[in-house]
Image (cartoon, coloured by chain):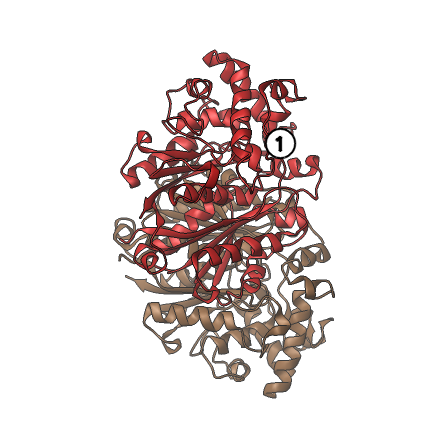
Chain colours: A brown, B red
Amino acid sequence: MDSVAVIGASMTRFGQRDAWIRELLAEAGQACLDDAGVEPDAVDHLYVSNMASGELEGQTGVPNALAQDLSAVPAYTARIDQTSSSGGAGIYAAWQSVASEASEMTLLVGGEKMTHRSTAEATDVIASLTHPVEYKHGVTLPSFAGLTARLYLDTYDAPRESLGKVAVKNHRNGVDNPHAQFRKEVDLETVLDSPIVADPLRLYDFCPITDGSAALLFCPESVAREYADEYVVISGIGGATDTHVVHERADPTTMGGVVNSSEQAYEMADIGPDDVDVAELHDMFTILEFLQSEDLGFFEKGEGWKAVEEGVTDRDGDLPINTSGGLKSKGHPLGASGVAQAYEIYSQLTGQAGDRQVEAETGLACNVGGFGNCVTTTIMEARR
Amino acid sequence: MDSVAVIGASMTRFGQRDAWIRELLAEAGQACLDDAGVEPDAVDHLYVSNMASGELEGQTGVPNALAQDLSAVPAYTARIDQTSSSGGAGIYAAWQSVASEASEMTLLVGGEKMTHRSTAEATDVIASLTHPVEYKHGVTLPSFAGLTARLYLDTYDAPRESLGKVAVKNHRNGVDNPHAQFRKEVDLETVLDSPIVADPLRLYDFCPITDGSAALLFCPESVAREYADEYVVISGIGGATDTHVVHERADPTTMGGVVNSSEQAYEMADIGPDDVDVAELHDMFTILEFLQSEDLGFFEKGEGWKAVEEGVTDRDGDLPINTSGGLKSKGHPLGASGVAQAYEIYSQLTGQAGDRQVEAETGLACNVGGFGNCVTTTIMEARR
């Protein structure tokens, strides 16, 4: 079977944007087509990763709007929702559309418009993804994060400071990302002194509420060569759920969806975690970067915090993680985030990452829905 | 490439149900697994076709809930939304998951819970899929239907009564469908004397607001033979958009998405419209059955109404259409409808349609999103 290639990528500026979802999607979608040099009438399938345009904006049917706005009609279109991992689910859908030969050119655009709603409103829309048995007791994703962080620190004898260092690292990376919501360094003291949100986690342990969009263009590798000398292939991809009721998990510091989805992706790519040169992890909360870096097999269980302490995951370390700034400083427009992770890996593998550039042939993106309720892992390899 | 087979199907009773979306999805999903004799741990991918659980119920993340409720964790899951054609889009996603070899066993469950909201509220949520330039002038899907019906009757010199006869036929079929919302015949006079909703269309020209769910189980044909002697294959499938702004269409009595998606499906199945033995069309409004029966190539443009007048589309006619009762009498729980169309075709092709049974080897389902904004067409063939 022909491999599935990515021949174009784009993302809008993330942050507080004076634009609705339709405008954000069209901005990223058009930029992606321009990046690849592909005309809209070549697009067969058009997928939109978006969790909540209806709930947040009262606007549904956005894939049809985008098809018209990009002049891509009669391209087939649909919306893919997997809550905060809608972007990763969109990548999986786009991959399947090309791998099944249903489409020869698939455009994926992920996006969310959130900042017009209050933090409480946005948090509640997101919390509506949790199991009612937890939701009705007032559980939100930040509160899961606080409970899990406390358990992790206690179980693995990790210092509170190590969590703060994830925020410091990712903010430092974000300074060099022109698309990031926050382009400012923060020091450890600022993180540790910020207001408590869900003990032991504080304000700077959390990603912000964000507007933004990102896009990727997929085609068979045989077609990719017509458009580009340098591109990437999706060499591995997988997706998996964990229990919907978070408190039913035997060990809440292990994300089963990360373990299972990455096993699928590694097997398909025929590589192991040691072969990954650069990774984008879903650091919606600082604690999640530890959990994923362990569940992906990068580090032993309970030792992800040491890697951050020792600088292993710094941009100049052995395994740079979140060179984009991560969700933490880049921002987290739900449906866009997984697509923007892949945009960063694509940029790194094609040598277009500017001041953030690292040396990498193989990259991995891990996109987490809910509190690990569903996860997709994507492995990309450079082709030059 | 191995064909994609359907080895199980189910639907819940449609109508006003004292159950939330999660319960409806679990009911259909479990019944489908039981029908096929497949254990939940054999399911690799689980897709949920649903437009608006967040908007209508304040509940998101339903695919994860379903994975847990069916004991299908760690199966990968995502929600597929294509407004009123979410079910057809789900079939396309499920087909792609198997055809791409990402999954060997994919369960698709479509559903919607609507009747707890007023007709005005539900209609407004649905209308939010229209282009803002039309939505802000108060356009709803029923009003598009009225305008189009008037144009059709004038252009093709069709009598108003012919529209009414679609409702009469589909209600007659629905009497024999134990899952249908309305199991009662209506006579032409009742339809023509019912209250005006969008002139010339009256109450009985419209489908109801409905709760319900339906499910299908997909696998490669080589795997299907392990589970069943009789099953169906998806021999053709396609999807296409039309303009999102309905008033920009050159001829509003032609649905470009139906034309384009069916051309793809016919080509893939290597058949033409004359080879179709039974069809389920998206009769959300009576006028839509005329448009689709013409745009699918069953009848000449402007002559679909004559086929209904002459009984061609009756259950004992040359081409039975909507043997299930259609959306008109069976009901239209948005995300379930496209899946339930395929359930009817599956039932007909496997000889399980009871009192509705017709002779058929090849069936077609056409699922329309918005007012033809995006359409999927699926062709199924019996394997015995």
When the figure is inspected, residue A101 is found, relative to residue A207, above or below; the finding is above
Asked if B180 appears above or below A313 in the picture, the reply is above
The residue at which mark 1 appears reads as B135
Residue nearest the observer in this picture, A303 or B92: B92
Which one is nearer the viewer's eye here, B198 or B23?
A: B23
Closer-to-camera residue (A234/A316): A234
Q: Chain of mark 1?
A: B
Q: Position of residue A131 (x, y in %)?
A: 64, 63
Q: Secondary structure at mark 1?
A: helix
Tell me where residue A188 sits by quadrant: bottom right
Is A95 above or below relative to A256?
Answer: above
Who's the residue at 55% across and 70% down the image? A170
Q: Quadrant of the C terminus of chain A?
A: bottom left
In this view, which residue lies farthest toward the front? B355
| Quarter where residue A40 is shown | top left
Bin the neighbour count of mark 1 within 10 Å (Cα to Cα): few under 14, some 14-19, many 20 and up: some
The image quadrant that residue A352 belongs to is: bottom left
Query: How many circles with numbers are drawn on the protein?
Result: 1
Q: Position of residue B225 (x, y in %)?
A: 32, 57
Note whether residue B4 is visible.
yes
Question: Can you see residue A339?
Answer: no
Residue B3 position, x and y percent, is 30, 51
Query: Which residue is pictured at 49% across the width and 59% down the height?
Result: B77
